[in-house]
Amino acid sequence: MMGFMNITIRQLKIFEVVAQHLSYTRAAELLFLSQPAVSMQIKQLESQIGLPIIEKMGKRLFLTEAGEELLIYARAIINQLTELDDVMDELKGSQRGRLKIAVASTASSFSLKLLGEFYKRFPGSNISLDVTNRANLLNHLEDNTVDMVIMGRPPEGMNVEATSFMENELVVVAEANHKLSNKTKIPLSVIQKETFIMREHGSGTRIAMEQFFRESGYDISSVMEMSSNDAINQAVEAGLGLSIVSRNTLRREIQLGQLTILDVESFPIMRHWYLVHRKGKRITAIMAAFKRIVEKESAEILNKSK
Ligand code: PGA
């Protein structure tokens, strides 16, 4: 029991980085420390705890069971300290508010416009943004590593608050001169025969697309996979196939006449964008300001920027 009293926050922070990357070298780089300094901190932590926390098997590092447990607590402590820092900043009336958000890759272009507007109003704020797919957004919420998330469908079975603020229509896109581009009410039986370019596993768009075809009794078998919406749009333009994408990723390509939206039966698939944060999260002034912009003003801001 007494041994734990000597653990320092610095050791926990170092351990958290080592555990995340499972590499002393990478952790040392990220922390601007020497590699021996990092491994010494881990050794000291182990001797205070009285159990090994990291083991080396072959060339790879592994967390021991004690290491896994410690990681959960280390992350919780670090998060609490960051929150404490924010609260104290707020009490000092500091302009240096911090906002950590993560957005679905499919939502990135309009999210950046909303962030732009936010930054105009809070020029002193410190914003960090992760643009990633649905699976990683769920991890962010689970691990409490961001303040807020913009995503396609709020997670089930997780204690979150979610507000829908905008429609998200999934449409079938094709190159502008595609043979189906002038047809109307194209049946799914025709669409099914085409080659499709899909997002990677873990993408919310992909999950919605697969669910749609499953429920309508069709199976698209001819597929290519890409992990970015831009790459997909370029691949469709190059004639590699059709895709199902959010209309939010498309504006420029449609305006430039590079892509066209096909008139397919049962489309668009109607979804919504949500602003999500963990329930019980302390909402700082800066988070409240961002929330207000997204939930109350996004339609106006995005219309203006068209
Ligand atoms: P994604 O978008 O496809 O970029 O993961 C999230 C979603 O639409 O749920």
Image: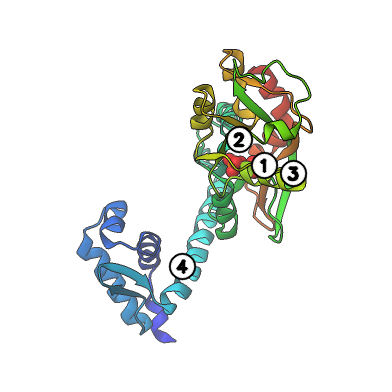
Q: Nearer the viewer, mark 2 or mark 3?
A: 2
Residue behind mark 1: 209
Amino acid beneath label 3: Thr
Give the Cα distance between marks 4 and 1: 38 Å
Sequence-first tag of 1 and 3:
3
Mark 2 close to ligand 1, CB under 8 Å: yes
Amino acid beneath label 1: Met
Residue 163 marker: 3
Q: Quadrant of residue 12?
A: bottom left
CB atoms of marks 1 and 3 within 8 Å = no
Give the Cα distance between marks 4 and 2: 32 Å
Residue at 73% across, 38% down = 272
Q: Quadrant of residue 175?
A: top right
Residue behind mark 2: 107
CB atoms of marks 4 and 2 within 8 Å = no
Q: Is residue 10 above or below residue 110?
A: below
Amino acid beneath label 2: Ala
